[in-house]
Amino acid sequence: MEENTKQEKVSIVVMSGDMDKIMGAFIIALGATAYDMEVVMFFTFWGLKAIQKGNLTGKDFFGRMLGLVNRGGIERLNPSKLSFWGMGRWMFKKIMKKHNVIPLSELLKQAQELGIKLIACEMSMDVMGIAPEDLIDGVVIDGVGTYIADASESEISLFI
């Protein structure tokens, strides 16, 4: 009897740009790597904020407007509730630090170090005026077909 040596796989679509949802996605992804699972995270629409550098984006009027109101960068993410016009982000960071919760920027760094594949949705980037140079290093740009191929091989698929 031949032993199955194929690594189990997790595929996560990250559509939300909310701090708490992004944190949950990274915690699940890192947890899966602890179980020696391959992890693919596919960032689309607002989820792209988590893998952007944080610079202003957009080339045309609408792209620049989106870039102003939806400025990316993992340190700029607001919680889904209690945002308080940006004060919620500051408040949650203080509370998380008090309770020794790993900051989002560190979760992202760990994900990259552990080989979690970060994919940016090319179509969403086009729609939102995000250029390849607006993304952090190590992100692959690809389409939904790549996600479907990964998800079809995955034991776990999540949409966050």
Image: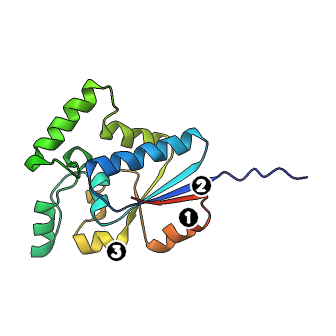
Image x and y of residue 103, in percent: 31, 35
Earlier along the polypeptide chain: callout 3 or callout 2? 2
Q: Residue furthest front?
A: 81
Q: Is residue 115 shown above or below 131?
A: above
Earlier along the polypeptide chain: callout 1 or callout 3? 3
Q: How is the image coloured?
A: rainbow
Q: Is residue 136 visible?
A: no
Q: Residues within 10 Å of mark 3 (few under 14, many from 20)?
A: some
Q: Residue furthest right?
A: 1
Residue on which the image places disc 2: 9
Alpha carbon distance from label 1 to label 3 = 18 Å
Image x and y of residue 146, in percent: 51, 69
Q: Is residue 33 shown above or below 131?
A: above
Q: Is residue 134 shown above or below 143?
A: above
Frontmost residue, 53 versus 29: 29
Image x and y of residue 125, in percent: 29, 69
> Which label was assigned to residue 94?
none
> Which label was assigned to residue 123?
3
136 on left or right of 26: left
SS state under label 2: strand
Image x and y of residue 16, in percent: 31, 59
Q: Are marks 1 and 2 in contact (CB under 8 Å)?
A: yes
Which picture quadrant has residue 14? Answer: bottom left
Residue beneath the point at 10% across and 47% down: 84
Alpha carbon distance from label 3 to label 2 = 24 Å
What's the residue type where badge 3 is placed?
A: Met
Residue on which the image places disc 1: 150
